[in-house]
Amino acid sequence: MRRVSWMGIAAMIAALGCATPAEMRKLQNRVSALEHGGGKTATGRDRVAELGTEVEELRRTVDGLNGHLDEVDRQVKQALEEARTARKEANGSGGGAPTAAAPDANAPGAPSAAGDSQEVQQYRAALAKWREGDSAGCVDLFGKFLQTYPASEYADDATYWLADCYFKQGNFSAAVLRFDDVARQYPSGDKAADALYRQGEALLRMGHGTAAGNAFEKVLRDYPNSARAPEAKRQLQLLGSG
Protein backbone atom coordinates (compact mmCIF):
# COMPACT_ATOMS: atom_id res chain seq x y z
CA MET A 1 0.00 0.00 0.00
CA ARG A 2 1.00 3.59 -0.38
CA ARG A 3 3.06 4.68 2.58
CA VAL A 4 1.28 7.31 4.70
CA SER A 5 3.44 10.40 5.21
CA TRP A 6 3.76 11.34 8.85
CA MET A 7 5.53 14.52 7.76
CA GLY A 8 2.46 15.59 5.78
CA ILE A 9 0.14 15.01 8.73
CA ALA A 10 2.61 16.74 11.06
CA ALA A 11 2.64 19.74 8.75
CA MET A 12 -1.13 19.95 8.95
CA ILE A 13 -1.00 19.82 12.74
CA ALA A 14 1.85 22.32 12.98
CA ALA A 15 -0.21 24.75 10.92
CA LEU A 16 -2.70 24.87 13.77
CA GLY A 17 -0.12 26.67 15.88
CA CYS A 18 -1.27 25.58 19.32
CA ALA A 19 -2.15 21.82 19.40
CA THR A 20 -1.36 20.24 22.75
CA PRO A 21 1.57 17.78 23.13
CA ALA A 22 -0.85 14.99 24.10
CA GLU A 23 -2.87 15.50 20.94
CA MET A 24 0.30 15.53 18.85
CA ARG A 25 1.52 12.26 20.39
CA LYS A 26 -1.86 10.63 19.89
CA LEU A 27 -1.94 11.46 16.20
CA GLN A 28 1.71 10.49 15.73
CA ASN A 29 1.13 7.07 17.30
CA ARG A 30 -1.83 6.42 15.09
CA VAL A 31 0.05 7.40 11.94
CA SER A 32 3.04 5.26 12.99
CA ALA A 33 0.76 2.28 13.52
CA LEU A 34 -0.66 2.83 10.06
CA GLU A 35 2.79 3.05 8.48
CA HIS A 36 4.17 -0.09 10.13
CA GLY A 37 1.09 -2.21 10.68
CA GLY A 38 0.82 -3.51 7.12
CA GLY A 39 -2.97 -3.16 7.00
CA LYS A 40 -5.03 -3.30 3.86
CA THR A 41 -5.06 -0.30 1.55
CA ALA A 42 -8.74 0.37 2.12
CA THR A 43 -8.28 0.21 5.88
CA GLY A 44 -5.26 2.49 5.63
CA ARG A 45 -7.27 4.97 3.63
CA ASP A 46 -10.04 4.83 6.18
CA ARG A 47 -7.58 5.57 8.95
CA VAL A 48 -6.05 8.44 7.01
CA ALA A 49 -9.53 9.84 6.48
CA GLU A 50 -10.23 9.43 10.18
CA LEU A 51 -7.02 11.21 11.07
CA GLY A 52 -7.89 13.99 8.66
CA THR A 53 -11.24 14.37 10.41
CA GLU A 54 -9.54 14.58 13.80
CA VAL A 55 -7.11 17.18 12.49
CA GLU A 56 -10.00 19.22 11.10
CA GLU A 57 -11.82 19.02 14.43
CA LEU A 58 -8.66 20.13 16.17
CA ARG A 59 -8.36 23.03 13.73
CA ARG A 60 -11.91 24.14 14.51
CA THR A 61 -11.19 23.95 18.23
CA VAL A 62 -8.08 26.10 17.83
CA ASP A 63 -9.97 28.60 15.67
CA GLY A 64 -12.58 28.85 18.41
CA LEU A 65 -9.89 29.47 21.02
CA ASN A 66 -8.28 32.13 18.85
CA GLY A 67 -11.64 33.84 18.45
CA HIS A 68 -12.13 33.80 22.21
CA LEU A 69 -8.67 35.28 22.76
CA ASP A 70 -9.42 38.03 20.23
CA GLU A 71 -12.57 38.92 22.15
CA VAL A 72 -10.69 38.97 25.46
CA ASP A 73 -8.03 41.20 23.90
CA ARG A 74 -10.72 43.57 22.61
CA GLN A 75 -12.34 43.77 26.04
CA VAL A 76 -9.01 44.47 27.73
CA LYS A 77 -8.23 47.27 25.27
CA GLN A 78 -11.70 48.74 25.81
CA ALA A 79 -11.27 48.65 29.59
CA LEU A 80 -7.88 50.36 29.35
CA GLU A 81 -9.32 53.09 27.14
CA GLU A 82 -12.20 53.66 29.56
CA ALA A 83 -9.71 53.91 32.43
CA ARG A 84 -7.64 56.48 30.53
CA THR A 85 -10.76 58.53 29.77
CA ALA A 86 -11.87 58.44 33.40
CA ARG A 87 -8.41 59.55 34.54
CA LYS A 88 -8.42 62.48 32.08
CA GLU A 89 -11.87 63.55 33.26
CA ALA A 90 -10.79 63.34 36.89
CA ASN A 91 -7.67 65.43 36.22
CA GLY A 92 -9.64 67.93 34.19
CA SER A 93 -12.14 68.52 36.98
CA GLY A 94 -9.47 70.51 38.85
CA GLY A 95 -11.00 69.70 42.24
CA GLY A 96 -14.00 72.03 42.01
CA ALA A 97 -15.14 75.43 40.84
CA PRO A 98 -12.60 78.22 40.26
CA THR A 99 -12.08 80.60 43.18
CA ALA A 100 -10.36 83.57 41.54
CA ALA A 101 -11.60 87.12 41.98
CA ALA A 102 -13.55 88.91 39.26
CA PRO A 103 -11.45 90.22 36.34
CA ASP A 104 -11.93 93.90 37.23
CA ALA A 105 -10.91 93.51 40.89
CA ASN A 106 -7.79 95.27 42.09
CA ALA A 107 -6.33 92.06 43.42
CA PRO A 108 -7.20 88.37 43.20
CA GLY A 109 -8.79 86.59 46.12
CA ALA A 110 -6.50 84.37 48.15
CA PRO A 111 -7.52 80.95 49.47
CA SER A 112 -8.98 80.84 52.95
CA ALA A 113 -6.63 80.45 55.91
CA ALA A 114 -8.68 77.43 56.96
CA GLY A 115 -6.86 75.30 54.40
CA ASP A 116 -3.34 76.40 55.30
CA SER A 117 -1.62 73.44 53.62
CA GLN A 118 1.71 73.45 51.82
CA GLU A 119 -0.22 73.90 48.59
CA VAL A 120 -2.04 76.97 49.91
CA GLN A 121 1.15 78.42 51.35
CA GLN A 122 2.90 78.18 47.99
CA TYR A 123 -0.06 79.78 46.24
CA ARG A 124 -0.09 82.65 48.73
CA ALA A 125 3.64 83.20 48.34
CA ALA A 126 3.26 83.48 44.56
CA LEU A 127 0.23 85.75 44.96
CA ALA A 128 2.23 88.03 47.24
CA LYS A 129 4.80 88.48 44.46
CA TRP A 130 1.99 89.46 42.08
CA ARG A 131 0.67 92.04 44.55
CA GLU A 132 4.15 93.46 45.09
CA GLY A 133 4.60 93.90 41.36
CA ASP A 134 7.54 91.50 41.39
CA SER A 135 6.91 90.00 37.96
CA ALA A 136 10.05 87.86 37.95
CA GLY A 137 9.23 86.41 41.37
CA CYS A 138 5.62 85.93 40.32
CA VAL A 139 6.64 83.98 37.21
CA ASP A 140 9.05 81.85 39.21
CA LEU A 141 6.69 80.96 42.07
CA PHE A 142 3.53 80.46 40.03
CA GLY A 143 5.51 78.34 37.58
CA LYS A 144 6.77 76.13 40.41
CA PHE A 145 3.30 75.96 41.93
CA LEU A 146 1.80 74.66 38.67
CA GLN A 147 4.57 72.10 38.29
CA THR A 148 4.00 70.82 41.82
CA TYR A 149 0.20 71.00 41.88
CA PRO A 150 -1.04 70.76 38.27
CA ALA A 151 -4.48 69.53 39.38
CA SER A 152 -4.92 72.06 42.18
CA GLU A 153 -8.25 73.84 42.56
CA TYR A 154 -6.20 77.04 42.23
CA ALA A 155 -4.49 75.95 39.00
CA ASP A 156 -6.71 78.07 36.75
CA ASP A 157 -6.09 81.19 38.84
CA ALA A 158 -2.37 80.45 39.06
CA THR A 159 -2.14 80.05 35.28
CA TYR A 160 -3.97 83.34 34.74
CA TRP A 161 -1.73 85.31 37.12
CA LEU A 162 1.34 83.69 35.60
CA ALA A 163 0.19 84.90 32.17
CA ASP A 164 -0.45 88.37 33.61
CA CYS A 165 3.09 88.52 35.01
CA TYR A 166 4.53 87.51 31.63
CA PHE A 167 2.48 90.31 30.07
CA LYS A 168 3.84 92.84 32.57
CA GLN A 169 7.37 91.65 31.80
CA GLY A 170 6.77 92.31 28.12
CA ASN A 171 7.08 88.60 27.34
CA PHE A 172 3.97 88.68 25.17
CA SER A 173 4.54 85.35 23.42
CA ALA A 174 4.64 83.53 26.78
CA ALA A 175 1.59 85.51 27.91
CA VAL A 176 -0.33 84.44 24.79
CA LEU A 177 0.41 80.78 25.48
CA ARG A 178 -0.53 80.96 29.16
CA PHE A 179 -3.75 82.91 28.54
CA ASP A 180 -4.59 80.27 25.95
CA ASP A 181 -4.04 77.57 28.60
CA VAL A 182 -6.64 79.24 30.81
CA ALA A 183 -9.22 79.52 28.02
CA ARG A 184 -8.72 75.95 26.76
CA GLN A 185 -8.29 74.07 30.02
CA TYR A 186 -10.87 75.97 32.08
CA PRO A 187 -13.50 77.18 29.57
CA SER A 188 -16.21 77.28 32.27
CA GLY A 189 -14.08 79.15 34.78
CA ASP A 190 -14.57 82.80 35.66
CA LYS A 191 -11.21 83.67 34.11
CA ALA A 192 -11.88 82.21 30.63
CA ALA A 193 -13.39 85.29 28.96
CA ASP A 194 -10.83 87.59 30.53
CA ALA A 195 -7.99 85.29 29.46
CA LEU A 196 -9.20 85.34 25.84
CA TYR A 197 -9.41 89.12 25.87
CA ARG A 198 -5.95 89.47 27.42
CA GLN A 199 -4.62 87.04 24.83
CA GLY A 200 -5.96 89.39 22.16
CA GLU A 201 -4.20 92.32 23.86
CA ALA A 202 -0.91 90.42 23.92
CA LEU A 203 -1.27 89.53 20.23
CA LEU A 204 -1.87 93.20 19.42
CA ARG A 205 1.35 94.11 21.24
CA MET A 206 3.13 91.57 19.04
CA GLY A 207 1.65 93.11 15.90
CA HIS A 208 -0.65 90.18 15.08
CA GLY A 209 -3.86 92.09 14.39
CA THR A 210 -5.68 89.27 12.62
CA ALA A 211 -4.97 86.76 15.38
CA ALA A 212 -5.96 89.35 17.99
CA GLY A 213 -9.24 89.90 16.14
CA ASN A 214 -9.90 86.17 16.26
CA ALA A 215 -9.43 86.20 20.03
CA PHE A 216 -11.81 89.14 20.47
CA GLU A 217 -14.39 87.48 18.22
CA LYS A 218 -14.16 84.34 20.34
CA VAL A 219 -14.92 86.42 23.44
CA LEU A 220 -18.12 87.70 21.77
CA ARG A 221 -19.06 84.29 20.44
CA ASP A 222 -18.39 82.15 23.52
CA TYR A 223 -18.91 84.69 26.32
CA PRO A 224 -21.37 87.31 24.99
CA ASN A 225 -22.58 88.22 28.48
CA SER A 226 -19.15 88.57 30.07
CA ALA A 227 -17.71 91.84 31.32
CA ARG A 228 -15.09 91.66 28.57
CA ALA A 229 -17.61 91.36 25.70
CA PRO A 230 -18.18 95.14 25.24
CA GLU A 231 -14.42 95.76 25.32
CA ALA A 232 -13.85 93.00 22.77
CA LYS A 233 -16.45 94.60 20.50
CA ARG A 234 -14.68 97.97 20.75
CA GLN A 235 -11.36 96.35 19.92
CA LEU A 236 -12.87 94.76 16.82
CA GLN A 237 -14.25 98.13 15.74
CA LEU A 238 -10.79 99.65 16.13
CA LEU A 239 -9.36 96.83 14.06
CA GLY A 240 -12.00 97.39 11.40
CA SER A 241 -13.44 93.92 11.96
CA GLY A 242 -16.72 94.83 13.58
Image (cartoon, grey):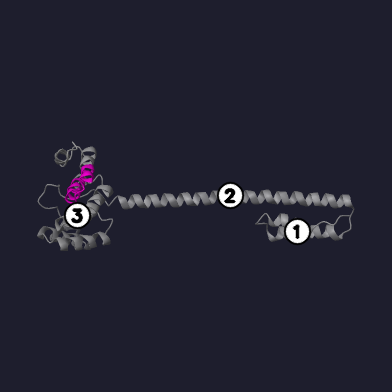
What residue type is disc 1 on?
Lys
Q: Is residue 189 left or right of residue 62?
A: left
State the image coordinates of residue 107 (x, y, percent, origin top left). Answer: 11, 53
**Residue at (15% x, 38% y) in the render:** 237
The earlier-in-sequence mark between 1 and 2 is 1
Q: Is residue 111 visible?
A: no
State the image coordinates of residue 175 (x, y, percent, origin top left). Answer: 20, 54
Question: Which residue is the site of mark 3?
Answer: 172
Part of the protein shown in magenta = 195-215
Res 68 label: 2
Where is the N terminus found, in terms of image quarters?
bottom right
What residue type is disc 2 on?
His
What residue type is disc 3 on?
Phe
Query: Which SS class for mark 2?
Result: helix
State the image coordinates of residue 91 (x, y, percent, origin top left). Answer: 32, 53
Q: Residues within 10 Å of mark 3 (few under 14, many from 20)?
A: many
State the image coordinates of residue 129 (x, y, percent, origin top left). Answer: 13, 61
Q: Is residue 194 left or right of residue 87?
A: left
**Residue at (74% x, 51% y) in the render:** 54
Q: Nearer the viewer, mark 3 or mark 2?
A: 3
